[in-house]
Amino acid sequence: GENVEQHPSTLSVQEGDSAVIKCTYSDSASNYFPWYKQELGKRPQLIIDIRSNVGEKKDQRIAVTLNKTAKHFSLHITETQPEDSAVYFCAARNMDSNYQLIWGAGTKLIIKP
Amino acid sequence: GAGVSQSPRYKVAKRGQDVALRCDPISGHVSLFWYQQALGQGPEFLTYFQNEAQLDKSGLPSDRFFAERPEGSVSTLKIQRTQQEDSAVYLCASSLTSGVGETQYFGPGTRLLVL
């Protein structure tokens, strides 16, 4: 089955700088990769996702890149703001089913003022 | 419209007690998922419903865990004879269909503490 690893576990960046979070997956057949943001005590919320037929997707300050050959995908946040502080989770679709997501362990992003 | 709701938001149980956690998905959503999220970890899949059919319960950690969705809308996750290791946040999510890439919308979770 699928296995997803995420790093770093904690990332601290200066406000205005960029943040990059990386994930690797094990199943080359996986084809859907969402990123969720979870603020303390709140529910996970989808912020961006990418399918395996594209290499990059952008939405304002957020972008995701996918390297299928290397089986890794990354979240890029530019011009970070205090409200970006949260835990970010990557996930990959488990190809053994048509719905199950396998999640990374999360990255705690801290934006320093 | 209303999002996914869960109740109770917090539950304290004594070891050995039975608990029932409720999920109200977004109206019309076909798919419903239950996840367990331990402190500092990502959500772990427990079970999946497509309408009233429980298509996958491979993530349920033991036979003390039971889930149902009898009318294809509200779902209940029941934990019998709770143990301390059951302490976690239980998240429910729903999606409109079961298609690839269908966004899962999460509820606020039920924080279960077993003493």
Image: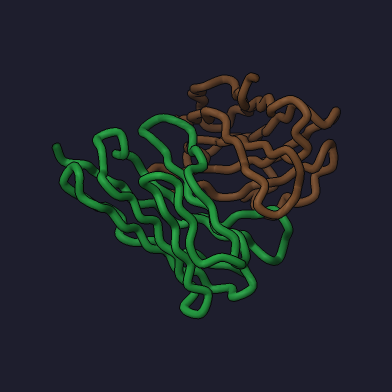
Q: Quadrant of residue B69?
A: top right
Percent x, y of residue B60: 65, 48
Chain in green (letter): A
Residue B110, percent from left and from top: 53, 28
Q: Residue at x 47, y 72 (%)?
A: A67
Quarter containing the N terminus of chain B: top right
| Colouring chosen for the image of the structure | by chain
**Residue at figure coordinates x 62%, y 41% from the top left:** B104
Locate residue A64 relative to residue A82 in the image: left or right: right
Residue B8, image x, y percentages:
56, 20
Q: In the rendered view, does A52 fall on the left or right side of A110?
A: right
The residue under the point 49% across, 56% down is A57
Question: Which residue is depicted at the point 52% across and 28% down?
Answer: B108
Q: Say which quadrant the C terminus of chain B sits in.
A: top left
Chain B tint in image? brown
How many numbered markers are drawn? 0
Percent x, y of residue A107: 34, 51
Q: Could you tell whether B70 is left or right of A58 in the image?
A: right
The foreground one among B81 and A64 is A64
In this view, A65 is above or below B58: below
Asked whether A10 or B9 is in front, the reply is A10
Hey, which quadrant is residue B49 in on the image?
top right
Say left or right for B25 vs A36. right
Q: Residue furthest bottom?
A: A69
